[in-house]
Amino acid sequence: MSTTLSRRTFATALVASVPALSRRALAQTVPPKPRVICYIGGYTQHGPPGGAGNGQGISVFEMNPDTSSLSPLMTYVDIASPSFMAMSSDFRHLYALSEIDDFNASKEGCVTAFSVNRSSGELTKLNVMRSGGAVPAHLSIHASGKYVLVANYMGGTVGVLPIHPDGSLGDPTDVVHNTGPRMPDRAADNPPGNFAISDHSMAHVHMVASDPSGRYVLACDAGLDRVYVWTLDLHTGRLVPAKTPFIAMTPGSAPRHFSFNEKGTMIYILGEQDSKVVAATFNPQTGEIVPQQTVSTVTPHFRGSTLAAGILLSPNGKYLYVSNRLGDSLASFHVNDDGTLNLVEEIWMHADYGRAMMFDPSGTFLFCANQRSDSVTSFKANAQTGVLDFTWNFTPVGSPTTFAFMNTI
């Protein structure tokens, strides 16, 4: 009888020869890959005046780390128009604003605090707190982890909400209202043929966040065409104007969002109305902003209406990405050694009215929330060239506008 063994038989015999205890020990040395959870929010039927959408609340998905495809897990419907969210640095809490103006008799919006199950991704509501103004459009967690900062668009205010030890929110410790002269609805440096306008009838705070050090708090006011700078008293939760309390941007440009480099020495300010990025130095000691360069988020060939929406630095800090609504494009810029920008490419976003963008935890895929297409799309980002390759993954989500990601444990 032949004693020759097939490769399969040999492999089976080899595994069988390993004691069961050893096999269990071997399995225990290879930890399972964490699941990637993606939270997506947007506009629901209960939304701001004239801004109601098709969303249901906060949709929770599991992401395939190899393909970027999203599989639905659950949806939290007990929240109105969660158009912006922020995850705590320890992934234990999620904060979502409601872009509404009827939370209370003062016609404010609100912010909901959730605790996060790190294993399943499930959310548990902790409490809901007023935002300090009407129609909040953006929130962030201060670098200290002690406060949630809220930009109230229609209220023209910045609200400071204390975070309690259990992650719930307290009543605002400060509400700052900006004032200034009436600015033009369009900028002089508009792309040719741009008929889109940004509302400059009053103060419209569109974003608020701290610099990486947490020493300063900055806010884009798209109505007054200013970027404000404060310090935050961590004991009282009050904002104090910096030595230079604001920098004036191009009249009519509607500064919408900004992004810092990792060191906090460069800030990139996105103008909504004129679709421009202002690259500026930032002094972490004084809070001073000094513009160095202005670049267009659309190519010189573009003609027509467009409004810039989101701005995002790549995880390695080498590339900057911008989403353009109406023009339906994504622009990628190379970040030079001196912090200035060069346009790499402008590509079709394969959807309509793309707003927020976010990288998955690995930094491999860039996701875009496409409000009018009711979809989320993804692109594979080349970390060496900045080029985006469309994955052809479409995820149906009603009126999406915001993301948060988390690896499970």
Image (cartoon, helix red, strand yellow):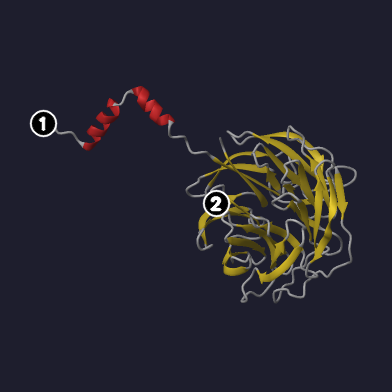
- Residue 56 shows in this picture: no
* Quarter of image, res 105: top right
Q: Which residue does the numbered mark 1 point to in the structure image? A: 2
Q: Nearer the viewer, residue 4 or 231?
A: 231
N-terminal of the two: label 1 or label 2? Answer: 1
Q: Position of residue 226 (x, y in %)?
A: 81, 63
Q: Which of 71 and 364 is in front in this view?
A: 364
Q: Quadrant of the C terminus?
A: top right
Amino acid on which disc 1 is placed? Ser
Amino acid on which disc 2 is placed? Gly
The residue that appears at 18% across and 33% down in the rendered structure is 5
Q: Which residue does the numbered mark 2 point to in the structure image? A: 363
The numbered disc on residue 199 is none
Q: Element under label 1? A: loop
Check the image and name the residue furthest to the left. 1
Q: In this view, does 293 lie above or below 125?
A: below
Looking at the image, residue 376 sits to the left or right of residue 384; the answer is right
- Residue 151 shows in this picture: yes
The residue that appears at 71% across and 59% down in the rendered structure is 258
* Quarter of image, res 253: bottom right
Looking at the image, residue 386 sits to the left or right of residue 18; the answer is right
Q: Quadrant of the N terminus?
A: top left
Q: Position of residue 43 (x, y in %)?
A: 72, 50
Task: Give yes or no for contact between labels 1 and 2 (Cβ–Cβ under 8 Å).
Answer: no
Q: Where is residue 28 in the image (x, y as percent from the top left)?
A: 43, 29
Q: Element under label 2? A: loop
Mark 1: give few (<14), some (14-19) or many (20+) Cα within 10 Å: few
Give the CA separation, mark 1 to mark 2. 55 Å
* Mark 1 or 2, closer to the camera: 2
